[in-house]
Image: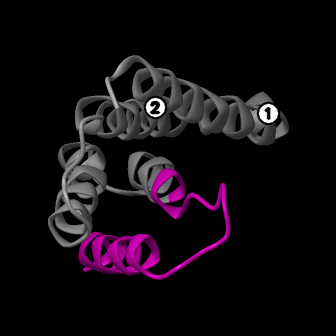
Amino acid sequence: MLALALVIGGVISRIVIHSPNFTPVIAVALFSGVYLNKKYAAVVPLLLMIASDVILGFHDTILYTWGSVALISLIGLAVKKNMSRSWIWEFMPILIRRRTYKFHSITLEQANLLPP
């Protein structure tokens, strides 16, 4: 039920006009890795991306955007594995900022390499 709510909420958040650098998909990917079963951790964010790209239209950077989202969900799994350690909660905001920056740098760099 939670997985379905994350997919529906994520698709709606990608379709509705939002402010720049507002990335609920990354939050869903990280949240999925931490709170869902291991088999749903990468599936839920990828379903979100597939469903929203069907509506929005496919693009040339799908491999990079979907790959970045899958990597972020794997980071969520690593956080889940280490949740009992207190240091992870101190550095979580830093990790999220770095991963968000990495998502943007990967997708923007690949978009710049593609022909117009």
Q: Name the residue at 27% across, 62% down.
A: 48
Where residue 6 appears, as percent x and y from the top left, is 36, 72
Circle 2 sits in a helix, a strand or a loop, which is it?
A: helix
What residue type is disc 1 on?
Answer: Ile
Circles 2 and 1: CB atoms closer than 8 Å: no
Q: Name the residue at 23% across, 50% down.
A: 46
Where residue 20 appears, as percent x and y from the top left, is 66, 60
Q: In the depicted view, which residue is nearer to us: 103 or 59?
A: 59
- Density class for disc 1 (Cα within 10 Å; few <14, some 14-19, many ≥20) is few
Image quadrant where one finds the C terminus? top left
Q: Residue furthest front?
A: 116
Q: Is residue 19 left or right of residue 54?
A: right
Figure check: 17 above or below 26? below
Where residue 43 appears, as percent x and y from the top left, is 19, 50
Q: Name the residue at 42% across, 70% down.
A: 14
Residue 60 colored magenta? Answer: no
Q: Which residue is mark 1?
A: 94
Q: Name the residue at 79% across, 42% down.
A: 93
